[in-house]
Structures are given as structure tokens and as C-alpha cells.
Image (cartoon, rainbow, N blue to C red):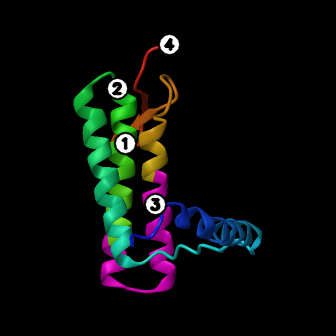
Amino acid sequence: MKPSVFRFFYKAPPFVALLALVGVAGCQSAPYQLKVEQTPSTLLYSYAIANGMARGQLMSGGLSLPQIVQIVTADREALAAILVFRDHPGSNTLKVAGLKVEAFLATIDEPAPLGSSMLVLPNGVPVPLSRP
């Protein structure tokens, strides 16, 4: 004799109750503290992604000369900090390089508005990059 299909419905309520209990217990437990620590690999990956984002913005156009100069300057500062970390590995240089990459990302997200950038010539004379 075949087992009845209705037999499942007799056993289903305990399983549903158990799943509901596990779901509620998971919601009531202490939140998991996700701690993201910066490593040399994450630093390089972050820089590579930021560099690609900057290239995309430059290729899309619509940026003024001061904004382009600001992005390129932030890129060079981040790369220089990463190279310093490569030559002198340590927690301080890793932290500084991470901050420079974060500043580079911030520059990509919101370049400086027009009229707020200056170019300093080799003889030390500042020249505004946009005309008022």
C-alpha cells in the first residue's frame, strides 16, 4: 500500500514551527561584528579599482581641467603612498596608503567645483585654472 500524501501535512507543522523558531532566534541573537582589516592585497585591489573608475570618468568627458588635475594629483599621491608602503612595510605606512587611496576615491566621487583649483608653476606663482 502506498503512503498517503496527506501524511506530509501531519508532519509539516512541527518542521514549520522549528524553522520559525530558528529564524526568530537568529534575529534575536547579538549582531555579528564584521571587522574589515586592511591588508596589502585589499590596498592594491582598492587602488586598481579606483584607478579604473578615474579612467572611466576621464574617458566619459565632462570634466574641467581643474577636476582632471585634481584626479591625477590624487592618483599620484595614492600610488606614491603605496610605493612607500612597498619599500617600508609597516602598519603606519599601510594606514597612510589606505588613507591616500580613500582620498583618491573621494576625489573621483566628487571632483572639486570649478573656480576652486590653482596650478602652481615651477617658479612658485599660483595660476587659477578657471576664469571667474
76 versus 89 height, above or below: above
Q: In front: mark 1 or mark 4?
A: 1
| Image quadrant in which the N terminus is located | bottom left
Q: Counting other residues with Cα less than 10 Å from the Cα at mark 2, is it few (<14), some (14-19), or many (20 or more)?
A: some
Q: Which residue is under mark 2?
A: 63
Could you tell me which residue is drawn at 25 percent across and 41 percent down? 55
Q: Which residue is under mark 1?
A: 71
Q: Disc 4 residue type?
A: Pro
Q: Secondary structure at mark 1?
A: helix
Closer to the chain start, of discs 2 and 3, is: 2
Answer whether residue 123 is visible to the viewer in this image: no
Q: Which residue is under mark 4?
A: 132
Could you tell me which residue is drawn at 47 percent across and 23 percent down? 114
Q: Secondary structure at mark 3?
A: helix
Asked if disc 2 and disc 1 are in contact, CB closer than 8 Å, the reply is yes
Q: In front: mark 2 or mark 4?
A: 2
Q: Nearer the viewer, residue 65 or 6?
A: 6
Q: Which residue is under mark 3?
A: 100
Spatial separation of the CA atoms under disc 1 and disc 4: 22 Å
State the extent of the magenta-drawn residues as a range: 83-103
Q: Secondary structure at mark 2?
A: loop
Q: Disc 3 residue type?
A: Lys
Q: Counting other residues with Cα less than 10 Å from the Cα at mark 3, is it few (<14), some (14-19), or many (20 or more)?
A: many
Q: Is residue 119 magenta?
A: no
